Image (spheres, rainbow, N blue to C red):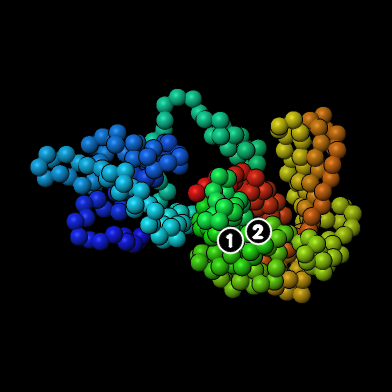
Amino acid sequence: MVPDRRSACGLCHRLVVILTLTACATLVVGGDSVTAIWQWAARTSQKVLERLGAYRDPLTGRYLIPSERTFRRVLADLDADAVDAAISGYVADVIRHDVPAPRLPDTPGPVEREQRRAAQRRLAHPAPHGLLPTAALDGKALRGARTGDGGRVFLVGAISHEHAVILGQDQVADKKGEGPAARALLSRLQMAGMVVTLDALHTTMATARLITHLGGHYILIAKGNQPLARAAAHALLSGPDADWTDTTATDDDRGHGRSERRTIRTTAADDNLFPGARQAFRLRRDAGDLDGTWTSKKIVFGITSLPATLAGPAHLNHYQRAHWTVETGSTGSET
């Protein structure tokens, strides 16, 4: 699916072989340099090169790799958007269970730290039944990357809650251009039946209308940029906790020297609150010490197009928790 811009005359090394070697090398040595990628490829066994479909010298019978110059020339002239679209499209198919997820063999030895943490999180916060495929929309500045004029590189990306992989991304001029770039990205994704969680920067009527028009669902946070919606949600959800027992869910967490409690209450809403709105929610976060003493409190209000039949309080609490986990976990180091 990725176009090869080289002339077909005298072409030996197929583009898919170059891209596969680059991807495998990057997983091992990182994106330090093209030289490091070529050096890793030079140590690849004949058996692996045969499986990849590398070029076979008709005289010696050996499988050959491209030269460092070829790696550098091909990667510099590559259609990055086409590569991103191809990889993101495959990832989206996996997320939707249209194609099977890749199964990796178990690696001998102790379990990695992040694997242990992920297993502990799943045990401490089991996912409620009936979750939909979900992505978090987030903007990041890439560490170490610069534009042609020396400026920082900003990306807006859609990241799967379940797998923490990028479903798609767009480069923006700066943080102020995230809104249009986010809508352009959403228009390219297959949104039908998917939930998108967004931070307050993207709580706009245009974004809400687009997501519902594409057949997806949104979960938005209403802050100062939407004062009327926030005030309306506040009015709908006011009152003592005893009045909201049936539409409340609480999630407790302990770790990293602190305790956290997330309590959410929900109520029905309609288009008068926000385009496509079906529920409003109030999320309270209490944080404190491990001894049970609460030291801080934060309350935010949100809007979602998910009806109560698709997402109860526990579902919305899970979606919001997963959004912040993905956002704080993405370091902006992907290139």
Label 1, residues with CA under 10 Å away: few <14, some 14-19, many ≥20? some
Q: Are marks 1 and 2 in contact (CB under 8 Å)?
A: yes
Give the side of residue 69 with respect to residue 281, left or right: left
* Mark count: 2
Label 2, residues with CA under 10 Å away: few <14, some 14-19, many ≥20? some
* Residue 87 spot, x, y in % from top left: 43, 55
Kindly report the distance in space between the C-alpha atoms of the residues bearing marks 1 and 2: 7 Å
Q: Considering depth in this image, is 211 or 225 the residue closer to the camera?
A: 225
Which residue lies most toward the left here?
Answer: 59
Say whether residue 59 is visible.
Answer: yes
Which residue lies most toward the right here?
Answer: 240
Q: Quadrant of residue 255?
A: top right
Q: Residue at x 40, y 51 (%)?
A: 100
Q: Residue at x 78, y 53 (%)?
A: 283
Q: Which residue is mark 1?
A: 172
Q: Quadrant of residue 31?
A: top left
Q: Which residue is mark 2?
A: 175
* Residue 254 spot, x, y in % from top left: 72, 34
* Residue 48 spot, x, y in % from top left: 26, 39
Q: Secondary structure at mark 1?
A: strand
Give the side of residue 90 with respect to residue 61, left or right: right
Q: Quadrant of the N terminus?
A: bottom left
Say whether residue 136 is visible.
Answer: no
Give the side of residue 18 with respect to residue 215, left or right: left
* Residue 126 spot, x, y in % from top left: 63, 43
Q: Residue at x 37, y 57 (%)?
A: 77
Which residue lies most toward the top here?
Answer: 109
Q: Amino acid at mark 2?
A: Lys
Q: Quadrant of residue 289?
A: top right
Q: Secondary structure at mark 2?
A: helix
Q: Amino acid at mark 1?
A: Val
Q: Residue at x 65, y 45 (%)?
A: 328
